Amino acid sequence: MSDDQNQQADQTAASDTPPDRLSVNPRSEHFDADKLQRGIGIRFKDRTRTDIEEYCISEGWVRVQAGKTVDRKGQPLTIKLNGPVEAWYEDLGDEPPVAKKG
């Protein structure tokens, strides 16, 4: 392969793996609507989760809502759970590239 083809392959692979950190809260600096619209799958401690508010792969944690409790501004209270985190885009089919701590 030429250098141009290698760079294009690297960019495609990078765009097919989710970011290291992402949040569903629009007030967060880690919020990205375009990436969330693609659908992100999260595996935390070998279990697929759908209730994740925010995650960080490199630091190994997720935030989940603490029941129905909200703060004084109406935002849900969250709990930080530590453990291995894996993320992938759900729109890429059955075997998408998975972002996980190397």
Image (tube, helix red, strand yellow):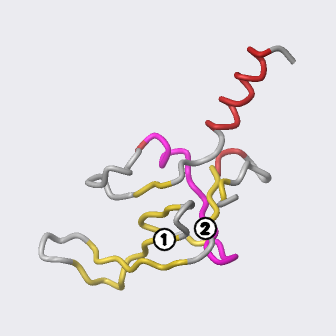
Q: Which residue lies furthest to the left in this view?
A: 72
From which residue to which does the magenta span run?
Answer: 34-48
Q: Residue at x 51, y 71 (%)?
A: 61
Q: Which amino acid does label 1 sit on?
A: Val
Task: Please state, as top left, top right, bottom left or bottom right, where the N terminus lies in the image.
Answer: top right
Asked whether, in this view, residue 16 is left or right of residue 23, the answer is right
Q: Which mark is residue 62?
A: 1
Q: In this view, does 9 lie above or below 101?
A: above
Nearest the camera: 28 or 70? 28
Q: Judge the density around disc 1: few (<14), some (14-19), many (≥20) Cα neighbours within 10 Å.
A: many
Residue 38 within the magenta-colored segment of the rendering: yes
Q: Which residue is drawn at 73% across and 48% down?
A: 97
Task: Please state, as top left, top right, bottom left or bottom right, where the C terminus lies in the image.
Answer: bottom right
Q: Is residue 22 above or below residue 8?
A: below
Are the residues tagged 1 and 2 within 8 Å (C-beta)? Answer: yes
- Disc 1 is placed on an element classified as strand
Residue 89 image offset from top left, x and y in percent? 63, 49
